[in-house]
Every structure is written in structure tokens, then in C-alpha cells.
Amino acid sequence: MMQRAWLEGGKLLRRLAWEGERLRWRLFHPITLGARIILLRDDQVLLVEHTYRPGWYLPGGGVDKGESLEECILREAEEEAAATVRDLELFGLYSNFSEAKSDHVALFVSRDFDLHPIEANNEIKRAEWFALEALPEGLSPGTARRLAELQAGGPPRAGRW
């Protein structure tokens, strides 16, 4: 009983920290840059579920100071999906103006990577493979749009996330 209370309290603290960080970014970083990656293997995609927000997402995150987009996505692939990526293809550049922010996202695709055992941590609750034809409920809207674009084919894109 006491252990469950500690776990629930930890979830609440992570959620509050996430919301506080979002507010800090809105106030002090009006323009943000991030990267996400579509990891594909045998018509399956690797998606992650975070500890601090509901839904399934593509692995990725924000570009750190002094870091290139490529360095960012290689780091995020390792941190969130335990993937060592060997080959990257730029899929598109997107802008997200929701929640009073000006967020820009570079999306990459990789079919050439090594995977290590994925362990749950403070950021990632779980990571799972899904067939492109059988994506899970709770897929984030942006992730759903990007995977639909991937399946449709065509040239690189630039638009709204």
C-alpha cells in the first residue's frame, strides 16, 4: 500500500515537472528545435510511451545547445529507444504552433540500426514495435500523420506537425 502511494506520488511529481518545463520553455524559449525518428524494420515501427504524458510517440527530443540535428537524433534514438543508428534519411521539416509555442521538428527515417535491450526509466515507460497496418490506440495525432505520410510515399515534406 505504501509502495503504491510512493509510485503514484512519483508520477504526479514527474507530471508537474513536465508541465513546469513546458511553461519555462514558453516563457524563455519562444522558438524551439527538435528531432524525431521513424525506426523501421520489416514494416514495423518502434514507438515509445513516456512516463509524463499519455500516448504513443516517435522517439525524439530537443536539440541541445551546440548540438546538430544529426547529433540530437542519434542521442535521442539511443536514450529513448536504445538504438544505435547507422543511416539517416531526412523525411521532413515541420512546424508546430500549438500551445502558444513556435516549435520546429526535423523528422528522420532509419532502416539501418542496432537495438539494445530497452529498459524503462524516468522518461520512457515502454517502447514497442507495431505493424504499420496495426498501429496502437492512443497514437499521438502528429505521429499518426507522419506515419500516414510515410506509407503514402512521395518527396520530403515541410509543413505543420
Image (cartoon, rainbow, N blue to C red):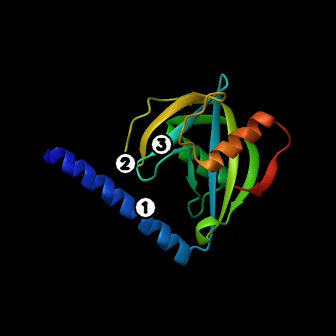
Residue 123 screen position, x and y as percent: 42, 49
The mark lying in front, picked from 2 and 3, is 3
Q: Are marks 2 and 1 in contact (CB under 8 Å)?
A: no
Q: Residues within 10 Å of mark 3 (few under 14, many from 20)?
A: many
User: The residue under label 2 is which amino acid type?
Assistant: Asn
| CA separation in Å, label 1 and label 3 | 14 Å
| CA separation in Å, label 2 and label 1 | 12 Å
Where is 96 relative to 137, above or below?
below
Q: Are marks 1 and 3 in contact (CB under 8 Å)?
A: no
Where is 145 relative to 111, above or below?
below
Q: Which mark is residue 122?
A: 2
Where is 105 relative to 135, above or below?
below
Pointer 2 or 3: first along the chain: 3
Q: Residue furthest left?
A: 2
| Residue pointed to by mark 1 | 18
Disc 2 on helix, strand or loop?
Answer: loop
Residue 58 screen position, x and y as percent: 59, 43
Q: Say which quadrant the N terminus sits in.
A: top left
Q: Residues within 10 Å of mark 1 (few under 14, many from 20)?
A: some
Residue at point 54%, 47% (across, down): 76
User: The residue under label 1 is which amino acid type?
Assistant: Trp
Pointer 1 or 3: first along the chain: 1
Seen from the viewer's position, the closer of residues 119 and 99 is: 99
Disc 3 on helix, strand or loop?
Answer: strand
User: The residue under label 3 is which amino acid type?
Assistant: Glu
| Residue pointed to by mark 3 | 49
